[in-house]
Amino acid sequence: MRPPADVRAAYKAAPHLTHVELTWREGRVEHWLRFGRPAADQRLDAQRRIASFAPGSIFCFVRWASNAYGTIVSRIDIVRVPGPGDAYQTLPFVRRGGELLLSINGWPRVEKVLHAVDGVEALGLDPIEAAPDYWRHVHNRLTAGQVPRAYALDQHRAWLARRSIEP
């Protein structure tokens, strides 16, 4: 299924960016960003917009949907935007895709990820600055039914030091 013409036009306007389709229909379809810094933001109508991210950016995309019988989708993805020539995974509503640092389904586990994000913010840090390995850790622990460790300032300082010497 092809995206609508207005969405395709947004993709063509900035092909070097990764575009995330966000929809908000209260109580039915709620796609939103928990964190991330879009390079561009385009409102399509009252309920839809496209947030576009530059290569290397990290964002957290939450999807929730329901029907007359209850919740049908609860999902959270933390994604790093690939650069030109980088490998990436595809995922719904994200054009061209990205490197999945975390991908969790089911509201109880999604809520635990949201608490982990809150924990990073409680340290006075923007979650996009947290070590990507931390988000992988949270993914792996929750997938295994374990409790993830909290992010620590020592861990963050180590990440910043490692990042400063990586090519």
Image (cartoon, rainbow, N blue to C red):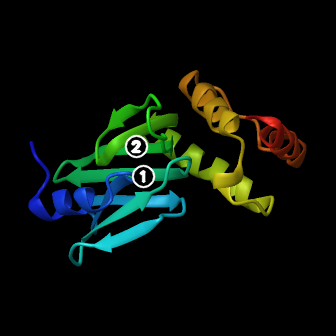
Which numbered disc flags the more N-terminal residue, 2 or 1? 1
Q: At 87% across and 49% down in the image, what residue appears?
A: 153
Q: Are marks 2 and 1 in contact (CB under 8 Å)?
A: yes
Q: Quadrant of residue 48?
A: bottom left
- 85 versus 75 height, above or below: above
Q: At 31% across and 46% down in the image, what residue appears?
A: 95
Left or right position of 117 against 73:
right
Closer to us: 26 or 70: 26
Left or right position of 128 against 83:
right
- The label number, if any, that marks residue 29 in the structure image: none
- 2 versus 48 height, above or below: above
Closer to us: 68 or 81: 81
Closer to us: 2 or 143: 2
Q: Which residue is mark 1?
A: 62
| Secondary element at tag 2 | strand
- 5 versus 142 height, above or below: below
Q: Which residue is mark 2?
A: 75
Q: Quadrant of the N terminus?
A: top left
